[in-house]
Image (tube, rainbow, N blue to C red):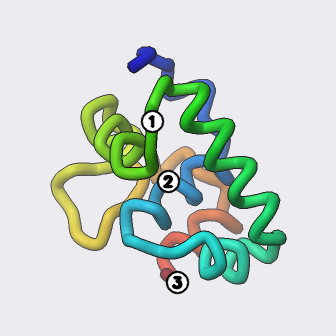
Amino acid sequence: MKQVSDGLIDDRDRLLIVMLARGHTTARIAREMRLSRYTIAERISKLLDRFGCSNRSELVAYSYVHELLHAGSWPPCAAAAGRIDPHVKAELSRS
């Protein structure tokens, strides 16, 4: 796995990883983010490539290890929630 700085993750990618960690399907993520499931599948594929992960589970594990997700809370949430724009922060709290 590649080590990638937290600064390379935008709010939408962080939200997508949180939703994957919560076990959401591609279709559900697409509905909640108001994007097509094909767009979500493409974003997931790009994140897998960016982090050198081979599947969604590995991506979620990577996100915990590199503190992109906060390990001390359930349900999963972004580690840097204070730096997320208000729209995405609202989406995280709704899920």
Q: Which residue is mark 2?
A: 17
The N terminus - image quarter: top left
**Mark toward the start of the polypeptide (3 vs 2):** 2
Q: Which residue is mark 1?
A: 54
The disc at residue 94 is: 3
Residue type at mark 2 is Ile
Residue 85 x/y as whole percent: 67, 55
Q: Are marks 1 and 2 in contact (CB under 8 Å)?
A: no
Residue in the image at 37% along x and 48% along y: 60
Q: Which residue, as the protein is rendered here, is positioned at the far left?
A: 72
- Mark 1 against mark 2, which lies toward the viewer? 1
Counting residues from the start of the chain, the first of labels 1 and 2 encountered is 2
Q: Nearer the viewer, mark 3 or mark 2?
A: 2
Check disc 2 and report its element: helix, strand or loop: helix
User: What residue is at 29 percent from the left and 43 percent from the top?
Assistant: 61
Disc 3 residue type? Arg
Q: Residue at x 55, y 36 (%)?
A: 48
Alpha carbon of mark 1 to alpha carbon of mark 2: how far? 14 Å
- Residue in the foreground of this view, choosing between 67 and 28: 28
| Secondary structure state at the residue bearing disc 1 | loop
Front residue (pair 71, 3): 3
Give the mark nearest the N terminus, 3 or 1: 1
